[in-house]
Image (cartoon, rainbow, N blue to C red):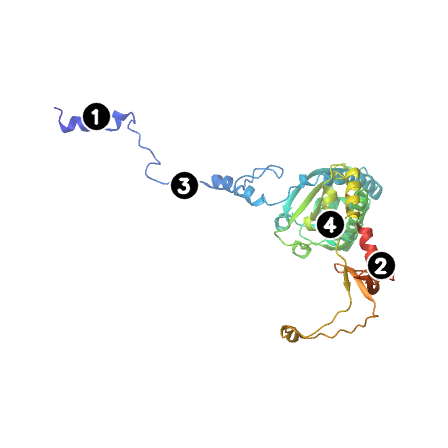
Amino acid sequence: MADDSDMTEENGPDAWGGGGEPDPFAGAERILNQDEIDSLLGFDLSDDESSERTGIRAIINSALVSYERLPMLEIVFDRLVRLMTTSLRNFTSDNVEVSLDNISSIRFGDYLNSIPLPAILAVFKAEELENYGLLTVDSNLIYSIVDVLLGGRRGTAAMRIEGRPYTTIERVLVQRMVEVVLADARAAFEPLTPVSFVLDRLETNPRFAAIARPANAAILVKLRIDMEDRGGRIELLLPYATLEPIRKMLLQQFMGEKFGRDNIWEGHLATELWTTQMEVRCVLDELQIPLQQLLNLQVGDTITLNATPESPVELRAGTIPLTRGHMGRRNHNIAVRVEAPLSPQARKAVQRI
């Protein structure tokens, strides 16, 4: 029979192959470092803007409508790039190359907080859409455009003077460039739908360029403008509320697409509509009475109408007046003789069908 000391040695850590090294996390909660917390939340500063969000940030942004669901937008902005390349070459008399960096979905509040200052923000209105958009010109492009338009020599980088507001001359020159870009944007949307983009104002403080609520989703288009060794960025932001009136057009896969339109099916539908049975009411007179009198009506009460047997009656389909006539009798039945043509409201309703 073994004594207690032998049993203690056999049941020790060495007997189970654990060795003599204690587990550093045994009996204690593991604490995440800052990198692991950022990765869990989806805030990885090392990732570029085009990388996909992960973690909780991906769950939060899942409510955003991806721009890929509006395939016509990419065609419109590709057309905008081509138009801007030609227009800015004429505007600056220099070799200008415009490229589309990326198109993404973003919340308006997040975008305002991410604008690198100093910058000029142009608020414009889409007249036909009855809403606003935002065009941001970064400082590199501002100084480059000013340098080119004022006769700066080629091959030299534009001089940047930080810490001062933009002068009146700089703002006027940038405003002229913004108007050129908005004219190209109108031409880019023209094959899809006529939209006039009108410059409303220029701002340098993002708080004064709030055209939507911070939580509202928007489409962000980043354009790169290169003029030899100078250049910068233009960012075009369109809230989804601005694009909502033309959303069905933006869902098209190509220009002129008809969403499953079938002329044969439309013909059958029109035929069935013309044979549809509808209820027509004959209204002799209408009377307005107080609610209390209406509630006090009893069986046997008499309601006096402002009509005589010779008064004209009105034929209605729902709330739409059709025509007028006179009541009479035919073959032991009450009948109405039509004495007026179809009303304009009825004609308009039929034309909509």
**Residue 96, x across and y down, in percent:** 79, 38
Q: Along the polypeptide, which appears first: circle 4 or circle 1?
A: 1
Q: Is residue 255 visible?
A: no
Q: Along the polypeptide, which appears first: circle 3 or circle 2?
A: 3
Q: Is residue 13 left or right of residue 50?
A: left
| Real-space Cα separation, disc 1 to disc 3, in angstroms | 35 Å
Circle on res. 344: 2
Count of picture labels: 4
| Real-space Cα separation, disc 1 to disc 2, in angstroms | 105 Å
**Label 1 element class:** helix
Residue highlighted by disc 1: 10
Q: Amino acid at mark 1?
A: Glu
Which residue sits at x=82%, y=65%? 328
Closer to the camera in the image, 11 or 290:
290
Residue highlighted by disc 4: 245
Which residue sits at x=73%, y=49%? 245
Q: Is residue 76 visible?
A: yes
Q: Amino acid at mark 2?
A: Pro
Q: Are marks 1 and 2 in contact (CB under 8 Å)?
A: no
Q: Are marks 3 and 2 in contact (CB under 8 Å)?
A: no
Q: Nearer the viewer, mark 2 or mark 4?
A: 2
Q: Residue furthest front?
A: 332
**Residue 41, x across and y down, in percent:** 51, 42
Categorize mark 2 by other alpha carbons within 10 Å: few (<14), some (14-19), many (20+).
Answer: few
| Real-space Cα separation, disc 3 to disc 2, in angstroms | 77 Å
Circle on res. 31: 3
**Residue 210, x across and y down, in percent:** 67, 55
Q: Amino acid at mark 4?
A: Pro
Q: Along the polypeptide, which appears first: circle 2 or circle 4?
A: 4
**Residue 21, x across and y down, in percent:** 31, 29
Task: Please determine whether, in this image, residue 19 is positioned above or below residue 328.
Answer: above
Q: Are marks 4 and 1 in contact (CB under 8 Å)?
A: no
